[in-house]
Amino acid sequence: MHVETAIEVLIKGLVLILILFGAAAYMTFLERVLMARMQLRYGPNRVGPLGLLQPIADGIKLLCKERFQPVGAAVFTYWLAPGISLFIALFIFVVIPIGGTVEMWGRSVSLSISDVNAGILFFLAISSLAVYGVVLSGWSSNNRYSLLGGLRGTAQMISYEVPMGISLLTVALYAGTLNLQEIVDDQKQYWYVLVNPIGFIIYLITAFAETNRAPFDLPEAEQELTGGYHTEYGGMKFAIFFLAEYVNILAVSALAVTLFLGGWHGPWDIPVVWFLAKVACLVFLFMWVRATMPRFRYDQLMSFGWKVLVPLATLNLIITAYFILV
Amino acid sequence: MKEKLREVGAMFWGLFIVLKHMFRKPVTEKYPEEKRKLPERSRGRHYLTKWNDGLDRCVGCELCSIVCPSQAIYVKPAANDPEDPHSHGERYASDFQINMLRCIFCGYCEEACPTGALILGNEYELSGYNRESLIYTKEMLTEKVPGESGRDPNREI
């Protein structure tokens, strides 16, 4: 029995990792094409039909690149940092329910790798570790730009974790549970975004900051820091940072869908399709915002996080608690 | 407060504008597949034109070579044989070379030419695999039939 469960979880994990890597690779393509169309360009359309083989060509190119490391780098940390980033990004997906329970080969298989009864807590704990990938790569590269990028990343990700946690607390209050599967089931009637729009907006903004995406891409600001924390990374190590960024976008989008947009529930009986469609909409939002918004200045970022988001999230939490308890 | 709200609204308006642009046709030209038609007087590769009777317009005066700011033109004049003339003048260009690597397509040669022999056409795809192939000789520059370059072969200048 235990062996069977272990094998099931292993297979689910492997399939999920493969899907996520493929999705992340094609998200880079999608992002380039979408941003190009928003800027009245065509984007990559040379490799294969409609340019669809572009991510594969990019992958081959990055795999064939020379391995190098800067002089004076802290070798162990330098090689470990991309791994941390990718591992954390993938690890969040352990708790996210992609669908309900399905019958497969005479077994009832739950479509989430693990049904953790403190899912939100798990997400918060793991996503705060993501800062280590950024700060360790920035510190170990022995480069001032990298170090500045890493420091900015630390400050930004830690500050924006606070409003994110508070906005997730409101969801926990509504649902009365931290279990993601139960939270999804609780949204069968109405989505939490309808009763808690401020919480949703705060979560989205902090999600942009957590994933280091425009307009919060200060840790890798090209114009100021020549790439920030991954300045000194090339080839496959850079590709891993890149993959981690896109898997992270998928992770925060999937969590937003799970907590606010009703998860895999929707009309008709197509749970996984609903989940994927909602995640795709949020991913589009990420790219859309990147094509529109200019980058924040560092002091604007900090004052926005601490002076606007934290009070707003706290107020939202207090009001929600009042309505739930009274 | 009102000002802040206006700024937030402007952010969403910006998002909408960007979305609107997604449904417009891109301005990019798909170059190798679709070539743009250049304006008629744009300056591309050179032609040595001919009169309608098949004689060279070039009289070997070397004015183009003198005016050329990048010294890309080489003209070797020779006296015309009255029995078998190459041009209507006393002399003709027995050799005429333009170094396309040096040419800056300023069009001074075309302006200086007293007989309208040297003109610049519209073709701009002039790359080559070695330097030798980019020195255009008289055979390459001269039109195969009068009027091939687009210049009316009956025109005086």
Image: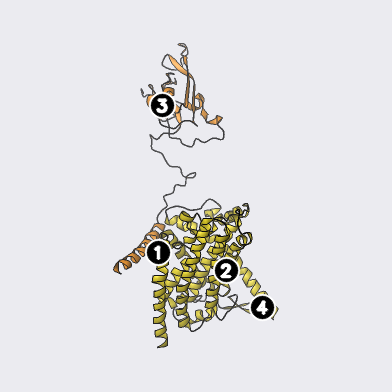
On the image, the x and y values in percent for residue A180 come to 53, 78
Which one is closest to the eye, mark 3 or mark 1? 1
Q: Chain of mark 2?
A: A
Same chain, marks 4 and 1?
yes
Q: Could you tell me if residue A23 is visible in this image?
A: no
On-image quarter of the N terminus of chain A: bottom right
| Crowd class of label 1 (few under 14; some 14 to 19; many from 20; radius 10 Å) | few
Task: Give coordinates of residue A204: x percent, y percent.
Answer: 45, 70
As measured in the structure, the alpha-carbon distance from the residue carrying label 2 to the one carrying label 1 is 28 Å
Residue of label 1: A300
Q: Secondary structure at mark 1?
A: helix
Q: How many marks?
A: 4
Q: Evaluate whether label 2 is on the same chain as label 4.
A: yes
Residue type at mark 4?
Thr
Query: From the viewer's perspective, is residue A46 above or below residue B9?
Result: above
Q: Chain of mark 1?
A: A
The image's mark for residue A88 is 2
Element class at badge 3: helix
Residue closest to the eye, A137 or A58: A137
Q: Nearer the viewer, residue A35 or A218?
A: A218
Between marks 3 and 1, how big is the CA–CA gap?
59 Å
Chain letter, colour yellow in render: A
